[in-house]
Image (tube, rainbow, N blue to C red):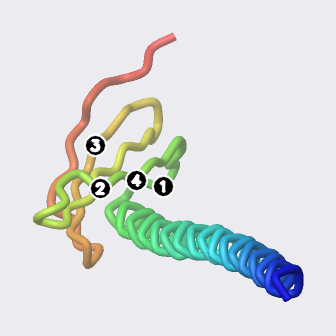
Amino acid sequence: MYQIKTQKNMKTNRFIKKATSAIVAVSMLFGVFASQANSLYTQERKNNHTSEFHKVLEEKGYAHISQFSVSKSDIHQSKYFVNFINDGKIYDAYFTKKGELIEIYEVAEITN
């Protein structure tokens, strides 16, 4: 009788260990997928802003833009900082999160 109870307890313990391992594996897998989805969403949003800002600058006459970078400058006011090179000059610009240009200023000129 005692031996039967011990075998049942061992089977129960093995089942609990396997179930726990499965739950941990599934939760880790979910965490990986969630972080990849968040990364993709962030990248898509950044690309959309990049194309919007690039278009606005082209409309302002900056036709030969190279080395274009966008970063968030102020979290609370949702401003974006854009750094770019156009015709041998380095420029900085600020945009609102709606894509409206706040200001552009020349930082330096590239010389040979």
- Report the side of 77 relative to 36 (left or right): left
Q: Which residue is mark 1?
A: 63
Q: Residues within 10 Å of mark 4 (few under 14, many from 20)?
A: some
Q: Residues within 10 Å of mark 3 (few under 14, many from 20)?
A: some
Q: Nearer the viewer, mark 2 or mark 1?
A: 2
Q: Which residue is mark 4?
A: 70
Q: Nearer the viewer, mark 1 or mark 3?
A: 3
Residue at horizontal 74 percent and vertical 72 percent from the top: 17
Cα gap from disc 4 to disc 3, whole angstroms: 10 Å
* Amino acid type, callout 2: Lys
Q: Are marks 1 and 3 in contact (CB under 8 Å)?
A: no
Identify the secondary structure beneath mark 1. loop
| Mark with earlier residue (1, 3) | 1
* Amino acid type, callout 1: Ala
- Report the side of 45 relative to 14 (left or right): left
Residue 43 at x, y percent in the picture: 54, 67
Quarter of the rendering occupied by the N terminus: bottom right
Q: Nearer the viewer, mark 2 or mark 3?
A: 2
Identify the secondary structure beneath mark 3. strand
Q: Which residue is mark 3?
A: 92
